[in-house]
Amino acid sequence: MYSVVLAVILGLLPISAMAKSIVVVGDSISAGYGIEVQLGWVALLQNKLTDLHSGYVISNESISGDTSAGGLARLEQILSRHKPDIVLVELGANDGLRGLSPAEMKNNLTEITRRSQNVGAKVMLLGMKIPPNYGKRYVEMFYEVFPQLSAELKIPYVPFILEEVALNPEMMQADGLHPNELAQPVIAEKVWGYLQALLK
């Protein structure tokens, strides 16, 4: 550790060499669909961490349209590249919108969590919901996956991250599914409220 600190002081290593890593593995909600990426909640969260001199750097590995299976398929490469201290998993909405099995989604999210933990990362799930027109039973089965995994795997989760956003038309894009620029600070603050405990 002393040699790393000395190297930074002497300018032999960038400050980022000592930074701790947070990786967001998500879909369009985290990828900033329909807005400028620098205005998305992930970028706003990075700004907050930077302002607080937290020493954490966020890498956004979110892809619009991604499912829990897609996130799992690319996870090993993500973990290898970033060696994260914390992994925020924002996946599942597209599973629900496609009517995929909540049980399969749960299995995928479980595997994402366990593989991340195996490399020493803390994991937090970001809960999502789907429109009620998918049927009461399916909607309930879908949403229950997040608190169930939180309890079973003993990891924190953020209840529906669009709770204060989804029913406010001023904060949603025309498609009614994606939050607009106005919503991003609200989402960032919601995630931040839960993330702080993992930073300690």
Image (cartoon, rainbow, N blue to C red):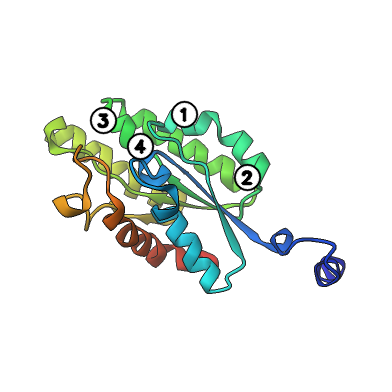
Quadrant containing the C terminus in the rendered view: bottom right
Left/right placement of residue 148 relative to residue 54 reads left
Image location (x, y in percent) of residue 115: 58, 40
Between residue 159 and residue 9, name the one nearer to us: 9
Quadrant containing the N terminus in the rendered view: bottom right
Q: Residue at x 27, y 37 (%)?
A: 142
Q: Secondary structure at mark 1?
A: helix
Q: Secondary structure at mark 2?
A: helix
Q: CA distance from mark 1 to mark 3?
A: 15 Å
* Image depth: mark 2 or mark 4 in front: 4
Q: Which mark is residue 92?
A: 4
Image location (x, y in percent) of residue 9: 82, 72
Q: Is residue 148 above or below residue 19?
A: above
Give the residue number, with chain letter if any, for mark 2: 118
Confirm or deny contact between disc 4 and disc 3 (CB under 8 A): no
Residue 14 visible in the shown view: yes
Q: Residue at x 28, y 32 (%)?
A: 96
Q: Amino acid at mark 3?
A: Leu
Dot 1 surroundings within 10 Å: few (below 14), some, or many (20 or more)?
Answer: some
Q: Residue at x 64, y 51 (%)?
A: 120
Give the residue number, with chain letter if any, for mark 3: 97
* Image depth: mark 1 or mark 2 in front: 1
Dot 4 surroundings within 10 Å: few (below 14), some, or many (20 or more)?
Answer: many
Q: Residue 143 falls in which quadrant of the image?
A: top left
Confirm or deny contact between disc 2 and disc 4 (CB under 8 A): no
Q: CA distance from mark 4 to mark 3?
A: 9 Å
Marks 4 and 3, the one that precedes in the sequence: 4
Residue 168 visible in the shown view: no
Q: CA distance from mark 4 to mark 1?
A: 10 Å
Image location (x, y in percent) of residue 14: 75, 61
Judged from this view, the residue extending furthest toward the front is 36
Q: Is residue 128 above or below residue 111?
A: below
